[in-house]
């Protein structure tokens, strides 16, 4: 079976996983993780979620 080229949407993920640079961030798929592999939500996102949750007009 001949290997096919990477699908563009997944090539960034592939390159990230194979990059040996220690100080890198994976911003490709919207799920950010801390050094322990746990999901990380940026403080600004938490603040906006609180604002939206408390707005009774939404």
Image (tube, grey):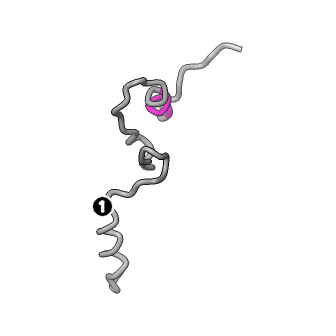
Q: Which residues are magenta?
A: 10-14
Confirm whether the magenta stretch covers residue 13: yes
Q: Main secondary structure of the magenta part?
A: helix
Q: Nearer the viewer, residue 25 or 7?
A: 25
Q: Is residue 2 left or right of residue 34?
A: right
Image quadrant for the N terminus? Answer: top right
- Which residue in the protein does label 1 denote? 43
Q: Residue at x 46, y 53 (%)?
A: 39
> In which image quadrant can residue 22 be found?
top left
Tell me if residue 28 comes above or below residue 48 in the rendering.
Answer: above
Tell me if residue 18 comes above or below residue 39 in the rendering.
Answer: above
Q: Nearer the viewer, residue 3 or 45?
A: 45
Please state the total of marks drawn on the protein image: 1
Question: Where's residue 7, x and y in %?
Answer: 52, 29
Q: Nearer the viewer, residue 6 or 18?
A: 18
Q: Residue at x 34, y 82 (%)?
A: 54
Which structural element holds mark 1? helix
Image quadrant for the C terminus? Answer: bottom left
Question: Where's residue 38, x and y in %?
Answer: 48, 51
């Amino acid at each position: 079976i001949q290997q096919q080229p990477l699908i563009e949407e997944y090539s960034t993920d592939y390159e990230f996983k194979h990059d040996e640079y220690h100080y890198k961030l994976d911003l490709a798929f919207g799920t950010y993780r801390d050094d322990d592999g746990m999901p990380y939500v940026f403080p600004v996102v938490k603040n906006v979620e609180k604002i939206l949750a408390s707005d009774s007009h939404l």
